[in-house]
Amino acid sequence: MMLRAVIRRAASKGSSPSLFGKSLQSSRVAASSPSLLAGSETGTFLHCGNHARSFHNLALPGNSGISRSASSVSSTLQRWVRPFSSESGDTVEAVVPHMGESITDGTLATFLKKPGERVQADEAIAQIETDKVTIDIASPASGVIQEFLVKEGDTVEPGTKVAIISKSEDAASHVTPSEKIPEASDAKPSPPAEDKQKPKVESAPVAEKPKAPSSPPPPKQSAKEPQLPPKERERRVPMTRLRKRVATRLKDSQNTFALLTTFNEVDMTNLMKLRSQYKDAFYEKHGVKLGLMSGFIKAAVSALQHQPVVNAVIDGDDIIYRDYVDISIAVGTSKGLVVPVIRGADKMNFAEIEKTINTLAKKANEGTISIDEMAGGSFTVSNGGVYGSLISTPIINPPQSAILGMHSIVSRPMVVGGSVVPRPMMYVALTYDHRLIDGREAVYFLRRVKDVVEDPQRLLLDI
């Protein structure tokens, strides 16, 4: 009926017989093609009357005044059937999300679910390890995981399809056994079954003979062994992307910067007394404990304001001076070193700094910290004292120009007022880029940190 309507409209418009004959012939070919009359896609289309009528109105508008050949109708049919059938499908695909502007790919570290398991919408099904953070791949809808399209250890990019998830209610009964059966069939019982069926064929023993000499056990073991002489009780583990990134950046720092470190020591008596005196009232009001880290960050902010060049950076032949203070905090986790940023530290008080530190440290240890929370930073504070470090020379975090290193507090004999008394002392270190920062500015910076920590009242009086 639809073709007859096309014929009548074409004849009424005075189309040429040759052109019309070609159109009719192409329409017959298109109508007889299996892509239109057979398959699940066409079946889906033919059984939806309402949608078919709406399609007819779209494909052949009566008021358009433009005649269309039957071949154009068939092509429109092909373009319409496929999207329509995909919309009626009950499967969705989980893809790799956008991982940040500076991250183009990652390694699929582990699957959190297995094929056949039911997942909820936005539930994590896999984790991707990048150079900076670990990112979750969430399920786009509730359903059952049919299969995974990648393997653990594969390198994936944003938009890569990872899993197929079925949204149908009875998917669990079908997916679970279908996934278990291949596992059983792919296991060791299947190869012997094939070998039993192919012993009569001459090609089977011929294929087995070259395999035996070409892949003996010694070459496989030697390929996995390192170039160094093998030793007992050793194991080889591939580096994570985060560890590779840290190693690269630190080596680039050594190769690029003219690194120099200056030291000083700080008497922690007054800051520790301040904390012990107000820690209960501080916690009761702000809901967070008063630590020593906030005192050092406030001291570092004051020192950066007194020595702006320490907060600057070299960019080609120019020096960029920053009128803001975003302090990075080095946090060691089980997966590697991450450096979240306290933005606008110069505008924060002690309570705001402590809350921000606790939040960022918790996210870093849980692996939920985002890339935006680690981007930027104009100066870094690293507290090796929490691990018991007495003194060290920290390495600059590029593209910054300096880093402050804190260390453990040790009671040492000090001369105070002509008498030798025990004092809680801490060594502090400043590693800086000597291309930009001279020794005078570096020493003045540490002296300012020392003065503020030893006498926190200076912050109140701004002296």
Image (cartoon, rainbow, N blue to C red):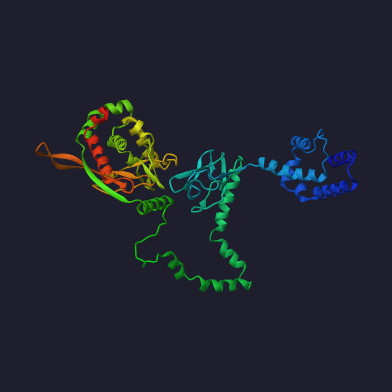
**Image quadrant containing the C terminus:** top left
Question: How far across and how far down the image is residue 231, in percent?
Answer: 35, 65
Who is closer to the viewer here, 75 or 308? 308
Q: Is residue 447 at all visible to an observer of this figure? A: yes
Q: Residue at x 31, y 37 (%)?
A: 304
Question: How far across and how far down the image is residue 80, in percent?
Answer: 73, 42
Rendered position, 112 above or below 54: below
Q: Is residue 338 left or right of residue 193?
A: left
Who is closer to the viewer here, 132 or 328? 328
Q: Is residue 228 left or right of residue 423?
A: right
Question: How far across and how far down the image is residue 330, in percent?
Answer: 34, 43
Rendered position, 232 above or below 274: below
Q: Residue at x 59, y 50 (%)?
A: 178
Rendered position, 31 above or below 203: above
Q: Residue furthest front?
A: 317
Rendered position, 128 above or below 349: below
Q: Quadrant of residue 121?
A: top right
Question: How far across and how far down the image is residue 280, in percent?
Answer: 26, 28
**Image quadrant containing the N terminus:** top right
Who is closer to the viewer here, 240 or 166? 240
Q: Is residue 71 left or right of residue 349?
A: right
Q: Residue at x 31, y 50 (%)?
A: 259
Q: Quadrant of residue 300?
A: top left
Q: Residue at x 20, y 33 (%)?
A: 270
Q: Is residue 406 at all visible to an observer of this figure? A: no
